[in-house]
Image (cartoon, helix red, strand yellow):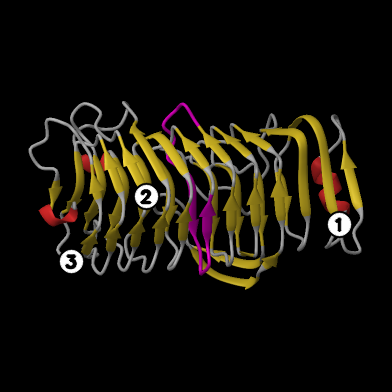
């Protein structure tokens, strides 16, 4: 099917992808041929289609400053850089406090950017970051060793991150996180090695049909977030490097001070490394946010130390969960009726 009114820009090894982005007009596509490109990219034009054809993006010798600089920080307080930074205009961000900077306002959303087919690796912040975008589509990329995040979106609308492979062997912080205004979807992704694989900080955010394994937490609905959906995912195997002092550091699903979350038809297994691990864990937030009105139903749980544990003070609903775990734990679920 032909692209509408499009112009195609082709980039070859030893050429600059950013130069092609700068030349492109809305509606154009940029095809990047196989090779390694040591660049950071900034996209701030709408309706740009960036297509990797075996292209690998890695950090340049010296990072450049852009809006995504310092969106996250290293543990010792240094600002990080993103591999691909996609952003709208007239954006205000809060100062960095923890995890990542939060959105204050967006003047103009950047719409309809698509990125597919790239390998992006070894950036110390985010391999791909988005701020103030609308209808962003990130698909079929391979994101390796993002120091803080594989993919992060902040203050966006209609984000879809689908069918990406996100991995690290360093137990980095988060594979994919959406902290958006609305309509965020993480679907069909494959995530391994991160502390937390998938996070919804978006009201109504959807985490569906993903696979996460060798992680501390498979998916999380975070404090104060309302109406997230965590459905039809496979969460497997607690990473041996996870902290053994606190059960939340090993759980397939964590509902952490979130409300009205639907946790449905997931398979959670082998969160049982060293006698720690919970299949599905509900708890209040660290600043008193109550996990309440959540529905946990139709999940299958196997070989977890504890299958379902609700330590919150809220009223939550459980039904039809099939618990098949065999372990030395004397408590298979709490409340007991959480497992059919």
Calculate the distance from the C-alpha at mark 2 to the C-alpha at mark 3: 22 Å
Please tell me which of labels 2 and 3 falls first in the chain.
2
Residue 267 visible in image = yes
Which residue lies at the image location 17% right of the left edge and 59% below the top edge?
312
The label nearer to you, 3 versus 1, is 1
Q: Nearer the viewer, mark 2 or mark 3?
A: 2
Taking the image as shown, residue 247 lies to the left or right of residue 201, namely left
Quick check: 329 left or right of 12?
A: left
- Quarter assignment of residue 28: bottom right
- Asked if the stretch drawn in magenta spans residue 172, the answer is yes
Question: What is the x, y in percent for residue 50?
Answer: 77, 49
Under tag 3, what secondary structure?
loop
Rendering coords of residue 33 (x, y %): 83, 35
> Which residue is under mark 2?
266
User: Which residue does the image show at 46% across and 41% down from the upper left?
Assistant: 211
Q: Is mark 2 on a helix, strand or loop?
A: loop
Residue under label 3: 314
N-terminal of the pair, mark 1 or mark 2, is 1
Crowd band around label 3 with a 10 angstrom C-alpha radius: few (<14), some (14–19), many (20+):
some
Image mark for residue 1: 1
Counting from the top left corner in percent of width and height, residue 231 is at: 41, 55
Q: Earlier in the sequence, mark 3 or mark 1?
A: 1
Residue 315, how many percent across, how many down? 18, 68
Q: Specify whether residue 335 is in view.
A: no
Q: CB atoms at circles 2 and 3 under 8 Å apart?
A: no
Residue range in magenta is 168-187
Packing grade of label 2 (10 A; few <14, some 14-19, many >=20) is many
Give the CA distance from mark 1 to mark 2: 36 Å
């Amino acid at each position: 099917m032909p692209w509408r009114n499009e112009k195609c820009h082709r980039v070859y090894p030893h050429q600059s992808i950013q130069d092609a982005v700068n030349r492109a007009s809305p509606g154009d596509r940029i095809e990047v041929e196989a090779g390694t490109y040591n660049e950071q990219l900034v996209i701030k034009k709408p309706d740009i289609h960036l297509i990797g054809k075996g292209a690998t993006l890695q950090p340049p010798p010296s990072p450049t400053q852009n809006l995504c600089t310092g969106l996250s920080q290293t543990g010792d307080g240094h600002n990080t850089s993103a591999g691909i930074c996609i952003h709208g205009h007239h954006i205000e961000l809060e100062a960095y406090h923890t995890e990542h900077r939060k959105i204050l306002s967006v003047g103009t959303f950047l719409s309809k950017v698509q990125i597919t087919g790239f390998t992006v690796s070894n950036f110390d912040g985010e391999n791909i970051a988005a701020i103030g975008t609308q209808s962003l589509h990130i698909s079929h990329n391979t994101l390796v060793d993002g120091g803080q995040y594989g993919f992060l979106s902040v203050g966006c609308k209609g984000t879809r991150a689908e069918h990406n492979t996100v991995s690290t062997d360093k137990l980095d912080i988060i594979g994919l996180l959406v902290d958006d205004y609305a309509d965020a979807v993480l679907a069909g992704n494959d995530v391994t090695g991160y502390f937390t694989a998938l996070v919804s900080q978006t009201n109504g955010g959807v985490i569906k049909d993903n696979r996460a394994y060798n992680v501390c937490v498979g998916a999380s609905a975070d404090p104060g977030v309302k109406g997230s959906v965590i459905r039809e995912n496979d969460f497997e195997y607690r990473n041996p490097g996870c902290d053994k002092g606190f059960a939340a550091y090993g759980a397939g699903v964590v509902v952490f001070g979130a409300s009205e979350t639907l946790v449905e038809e997931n398979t959670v297994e082998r969160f049982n490394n060293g006698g720690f691990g919970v299949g599905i864990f509900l708890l209040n937030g660290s600043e008193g946010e109550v996990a309440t009105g959540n529905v946990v139903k139709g999940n299958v749980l196997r070989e977890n130390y504890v299958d379902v544990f609700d330590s919150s003070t809220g009223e939550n609903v459980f039904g039809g969960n099939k618990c098949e775990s065999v372990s030395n734990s004397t408590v298979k679920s709490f409340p007991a009726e959480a497992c059919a």
